[in-house]
Each structure stands twice: as C-alpha cells, then as structure tokens.
Image (tube, rainbow, N blue to C red):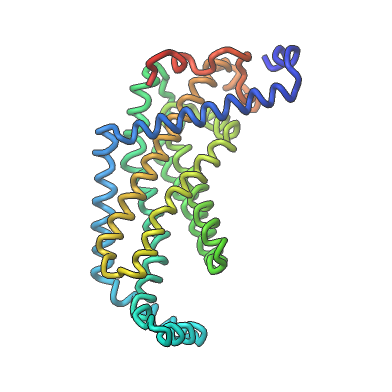
Amino acid sequence: MLAAVGHTLRPVGVMDWLYSRAMSLLLDSFWRAVAYCVHPRVIALSFLPLILMVLLSFGLGYFFWEGAVASVAMWLASFELVETLLAWLAQIGMDSLRGVFAPLLVLVLATPVIVLLCLLLVAMFMTPAMVDLVALRRFPALERKHGGSLVVSVLWSFGSTLLAIVVLVVSMPLWLVPPLVLILPPLIWGWLTYRVFAFDALATHASSDERKALLREHRGSLLLMGVLSGYLGAAPSLLWASGAMFIAMAPLLVPLAIWIYTLVFAFASLWFAHFALAALQRLRATVPVEVLDADPERVRPLHTQPGASALPGLDQPGST
C-alpha cells in the first residue's frame, strides 16, 4: 500500500500527509474528550475517587499534620540560610510568613502523593467505565479481543508507577532550581499518564499484538497527550500560592485541588480512550488481521490511501 502511495507522492509529501492525519486524530480525540467530560455518567463516576481521596487526605491530616509540620519546622531550623531568610522577612514586617513556611512546605511535599493517588484511583475506578462509554457510543461494532488482562494491567501500572516515583525522588533536588520545578514534575506525571491510560484504553478491545503495534506507531502522539495532561494536572499546585497567604484555608484548598486533579485525569482518560479506539478501528480497517498476527513489525503508520477515510463512520455528519 505504501508503495502505491509512493508512486503518486514524494516522500516529503507522504510525511506531511501522515503528520496531518495524526494531528487530526489527536485534535479530534481532544474535543470529543472535552465534550464527554460533561456527560452525567462521567460526572457521577468522578465522585468516587474524589470522596476516597478527600477522606484519605483528611484522615492522614488528622493523625499526622501537626507532627509533620513540627518535623519540617525543626528540619528548616537546622539550616542557617533558612533562618537568615526568615530573620530578614521579620525585619521587613513579614514575620507572619515564619508560621506558614513549614505548613506550606508540607503541602508542597504532599502534592506528588496526592497526584499519584488521584491518577491511580481514576485509572482503577473510572477508566474501564469510560472506555466502555466511548466504545458503546462511537464504536459499537469494534470487536473486544481482551489482549490485556486485569493482572497485566495492574502489573503494568505498578511498574510504571514505581519507575515514576524513583525519577521523582531523584529529581527533587533539581526542583530547587526555579525553572525546573515547572518542567520536571509535569513531564514525569505526563509520562506516567501516557503509560497507564494508553494501556488501559486498549486493554479490552485490542489484542496483545494490536496493542503493541499501536503503542509503537503512536508513541509520539500518546506521549504528547500525556505531557499536556501532566501540565494540566500541575495547575492545582498554583493553589498553594494562596495557601502561603491563607494557610487556614487549606481544608478548603486541598479538596478543591483533589477535585481538579480528578477532573484532569478523567479528561486524560477520555482523551486516550477516544484516540486509542479510533486508532484501533483504523488499524483493523487497513491491516489484515492475519498480517498483524503473523508479523506485528510490518505495521506502519496510517496505511490508507490519500483522501480515503481512515476512520470509517467518524467522518459522517452527526457522529459522536
């Protein structure tokens, strides 16, 4: 098929066409995910991770908050530079910051844990139901080959999470460099989001060979989606800027941040579901099953002829 395309288009033209098709799929999946976020079922599903995270946060805060703040305050007091900074703030009339510095640092250190738990709870309690929702509404005829079992999915998520935690811990000293604190955490969360949600989106409908082929073929687009989702997930951290001034509002700000995290990861899950299932339908429409089963390495991006619809049924008016 690619040979036939090569007779009519120059290589540069083929690459431009492939890029435009990939971007079209990515953007189409994006706006569909935004629209699905207001679906009543999605909203209802979002309450379970939210309730679990709020209960867990307040439970841990009730038992460990004061001890954690005291420990961090003692740790900060051991640094002469920090004491010099706090003394300087007191001289310019900002002595009140001494009392919120340690609590704010505890919130900042707890943020990666909150983000990680929100992501895993959304993947566990929301993603399977949302993939089913997308499949029933857009791809009712798409065969379910169950190429990823629950055990494989759990091991995949567990391994990816452990690796992300290791990278987070190793990179924490670099967070003290102002530009890197805005770059490294979102990139790490984005990579983890891509690993978890891309796998889960294909676990039910794709065979093992199909999943491997799609993850390889669309790795760039999927990673970009994960990184963008990671930056969206970093937005609630801006609430801690308010926490520095209104630390007493932490009981309100923490649930608000958790709610935003939940919505962001729910959107990311929908985005991956729309993208992955559409790509799977395209793959099956353009690559014979026996070819894929015999040699998954033969799969190449977007095997359709220029001008042909790569997503049957999605180009029709009124398709959702």
Residue 292 is left or right of residue 102, and the answer is right
From the viewer's side, name the closer residue of 129 and 205: 129
Q: Farthest front residue?
A: 92
Residue 40's x, y, as percent?
25, 33
Residue 173's x, y, as percent?
55, 69
In the picture, which quadrant includes the C terminus?
top left
Residue 314's x, y, as percent?
45, 18
Q: Is 77 drawn above or below residue 166 in the view shown?
A: below
Q: Which residue is drawn at 36% across and 27% down?
A: 134
Q: Is 237 drawn above or below residue 31 in the view shown?
A: below
Q: Which residue is drawn at 35% across and 35% down?
A: 128
From the viewer's side, name the closer residue of 139 and 77: 77
From the viewer's side, name the closer residue of 291 and 134: 134
Q: Is 242 drawn above or below residue 209 in the view shown?
A: below
User: Residue 299, located in which quarter of the rendered image?
Assistant: top right
Q: Which residue is drawn at 27% across and 59% down?
A: 56
